[in-house]
């Protein structure tokens, strides 16, 4: 089954400082990031449609780059892309 590689909570800027800075190298393969958006919207009292956002992505056999995967979120939609 799936293996948890890392977890974190975003700050007020929507980032997770130090995420994956432990020196652990990612291997090539399929990965999944899960964002629990319901708790964010429930805390703010806003209505929302997507209680969770899952982003699945594939790394090459020998990844040697920095990977930035933004999630742009609104109460009734989201988008993502591979950033630089």
Image (cartoon, helix red, strand yellow):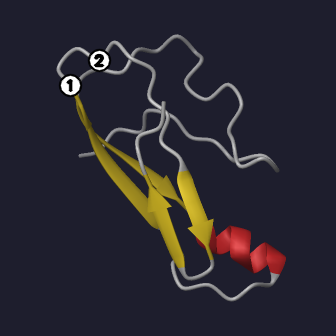
Badge number at residue 77:
none
Vertical relation: 78 (above or below) 34: below
- Count how many numbered circles sit on residues in the image: 2
Classed neighbour count for the residue bearing mark 2: other residues with Cα under 10 Å, few (<14), some (14–19), many (≥20): few
Residue 76: x and y in percent read 56, 82
Identify the secondary structure beneath mark 2. Answer: loop
Q: Nearer the viewer, residue 14 or 52?
A: 14
Q: Residue placed at 46% from the left, 15% from the top? A: 24
Q: Which residue is the extreme one toward the left?
A: 61
Q: Residue placed at 55% from the left, 24% from the top? A: 20
Q: Which residue is mark 2?
A: 63
Q: Nearer the viewer, residue 30 or 78?
A: 78
Horizontal arrangement in the rendering, residue 38 relative to residue 68 (left or right)? right
Residue 34: x and y in percent read 46, 55
Quadrant of res 66 = top left
Residue 62: x and y in percent read 22, 14
Q: Residue placed at 40% from the left, 60% from the top? A: 54
Q: Residue placed at 71% from the left, 68% from the top? A: 40
Q: Nearer the viewer, residue 8 or 44?
A: 44
Classed neighbour count for the residue bearing mark 1: other residues with Cα under 10 Å, few (<14), some (14–19), many (≥20): few
Identify the secondary structure beneath mark 1. Answer: loop
Vertical relation: 2 (above or below) 48: above
Q: Which residue is mark 1?
A: 60
- Asked if labels 1 and 2 touch by Cβ distance under 8 angstroms, the answer is yes
Residue 59: x and y in percent read 26, 30
Vertical relation: 32 (above or below) 66: below
| CA–CA distance in space, label 2 to label 1 | 5 Å
């Amino acid at each position: 089954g799936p293996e948890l590689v890392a977890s974190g909570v975003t700050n007020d800027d929507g980032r997770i400082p130090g995420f994956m800075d432990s020196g652990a190298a990612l291997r090539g393969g399929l990965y999944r990031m899960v964002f629990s958006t319901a708790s964010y919207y429930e805390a703010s009292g806003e209505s929302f449609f997507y209680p969770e956002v899952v982003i699945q992505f594939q790394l090459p056999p020998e990844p040697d780059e920095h990977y930035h995967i933004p999630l742009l979120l609104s109460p009734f939609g989201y988008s993502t892309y591979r950033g630089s």
